Amino acid sequence: MTQHFFTGQNPNITTETKAFVTRYHGLFIDGQTMPAASGETFDVFEPSTGHWLTSIAAANSEDVNRAVQSSRNAFDTGPWPRMTPAERELILFRLADLIEQNKQLIAEIETLDMGKPVIEARDIDVMESASYCRYMAGWATKLDGRVTQLSAGPGNFGYTRKEPIGVVGAIIPWNFPFSMACWKVIAALAAGCTVVLKPSELASLTSLKLAELAIEAGVPTGVLNVITGDGQNAGAPLMAHPSINKASFTGSTAVGKMIGKAAMENLTRVTLELGGKSPMIVLGDADPASIAEELAAGIFFNAGQVCTAGSRLLVQEKIYEDVLLELTKVANNLVVGAGLDESTQMGPLASLAHKEKVESYINLGREEGARLITSNRDMDENGYYVSPTIFADCTDTMRIVTEEIFGPVLVASSFKDIDEVVSRVNNSSFGLAASIWSNDLKKVMDITPRIQAGIVWVNTHNPIDASLPFGGFKHSGIGRENGPEQIEAYLETKSVWINHADS
Ligand code: NAP
Ligand code: MG
């Protein structure tokens, strides 16, 4: 394999980014960077060119044991769970500041590794992660139990304590690598837990950077270990490890189900954030021209590699053709290109295999008889680019409608009335998110409680906030991230009964 001279092709990156990407990348255990026990590595490719970028240590079960033991020791005997809540809060505030100070570096690493536009990586992924870190840091000092009223009468006192659940095994996908790493790690740390994180093989670099920043912020060694490697050799042994107390997974529904089963063997607590096929429902009173850009962002943001992507569009009959016309104009004019080019609106997909999977769905859409209404331009063959794609007149049984494509492909159809659209969107195994586009308050309030989804947006799609729970109904997951609900998932409740009656 010849080393790709990426700095020549990407003159925009800082010397700091170049230094980070070109240095040795090992596992991060006990505050040290180290090779895998087997000495194996895996290669990382740059999505905008397909060129080799670097290689990273590939963990197997021996490394998983080492990392879990380190986090176990840090939890059972180390300082982190024993610090005062205020000390933990302060360290996490420092981590938030470091994330913000390193925003350009983290964003450039993310773009080289995963392909997304650098401006989005910096201003959305990294900056929202800093806000998230501050929000969760604040919870460290607010984890109160409650005093209960025992019916046994005087001389009996009951209360609950919230205690950290223990060692967390966490696995994340590649679509928002840094944000997902922060989501998995920081709430757990705020609760007083320790974590072994396995990022996706396709985008591991910013997880390694997060681990370094955590040490710099004052998080003790062993509290956050990062093992890099693939799902089978590193992910599966981590999730099935008898010494973890909590398995927290974000990824596909198929893998999530396997992880849930493995966790039950040890009765490990589980949070699963899984896939979706989220509808955008446009009611007849909406103005097609004024919502077209936001609808387009609902599907094409992050090249459609978003678990909540508005990948299914349902438009009320009378404005159906107008909405499609406006949306197609936006899609056909989107600037698709390398993520480091600041004029890029949509980057390449994260891997060659994923690009091929998305393209196979586009071919399938044609075969299933859907109407392709976008121009589907020729893309640069070297990078993993896919043109923004919209299929109209889709029927609900087409596979492009029922399956998650996870790329820049929108499937559209029309509907007559609210009962019809509610029943059609609920007729899905997924239930992650939905959006309703209308200014008719009565209709919005009628539809919202009837939609089977963990999040319903109105006149927007995809925004998230650290305070607002995020997660799925049905096959889209178990549990919630963000908000106090997420902290709760990293705590056990202990009940205490004190008999202080005269004996
Ligand atoms: P994936 O194939 O399920 O992989 C996710 C992670 O699991 C990766 O780190 C992967 O490692 C690892 N993995 C794979 N097989 C495993 C196994 N047998 N045991 C343990 N770990 C295993 O999903 P993906 O294709 O990377 O990501 C896209 C999916 O994630 C989509 O379905 C999307 O909807 C979902 N997602 C959900 C949310 C949410 O919050 N609900 C957010 C983002 C993405 P390697 O890839 O390194 O092998
Ligand atoms: Mg990559």
Image (spheres, rainbow, N blue to C red):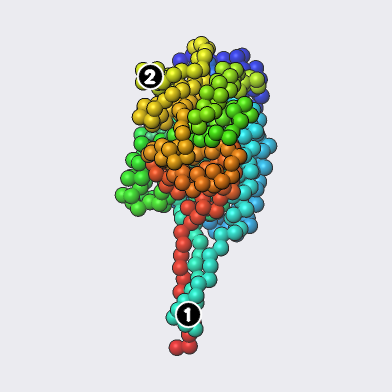
Q: Quadrant of residue 117?
A: top right
Disc 2 residue crowd, few under 14, some 14–19, many 20+, Cα 10 Å: some
Given residues 494 and 62, the one toward you in this image is 494
What is the quadrant of the C terminus in the image?
A: bottom left
User: Looking at numbered disc 2 in the image, what kind of residue is underneath it?
Assistant: Gly
Given residues 106 and 469, the one toward you in this image is 469
Q: In terms of sequence position, does the residue under pointer 2 or pointer 1 come before the other? A: 1
Is residue 441 depicted above or below 86 in this figure?
above
Q: Is residue 141 left or right of residue 352?
A: right
Q: Is mark 2 within 8 Å of ligand 1?
A: no
Is residue 19 depicted above or below 482 in this figure?
above
- Residue 54, how many percent across, how many down? 51, 23
Q: Is residue 145 left or right of residue 234?
A: right
Q: Is disc 1 placed on a helix, strand or loop?
A: strand
What is the quadrant of the N terminus in the image?
A: top left
Identify the residue at horizontal 36%, vertical 27% (top origin): 398
Q: CA distance from mark 2 to mark 1?
A: 71 Å
Q: Which residue is mark 1?
A: 156
Identify the residue at horizontal 61%, vertical 30% (top origin): 287
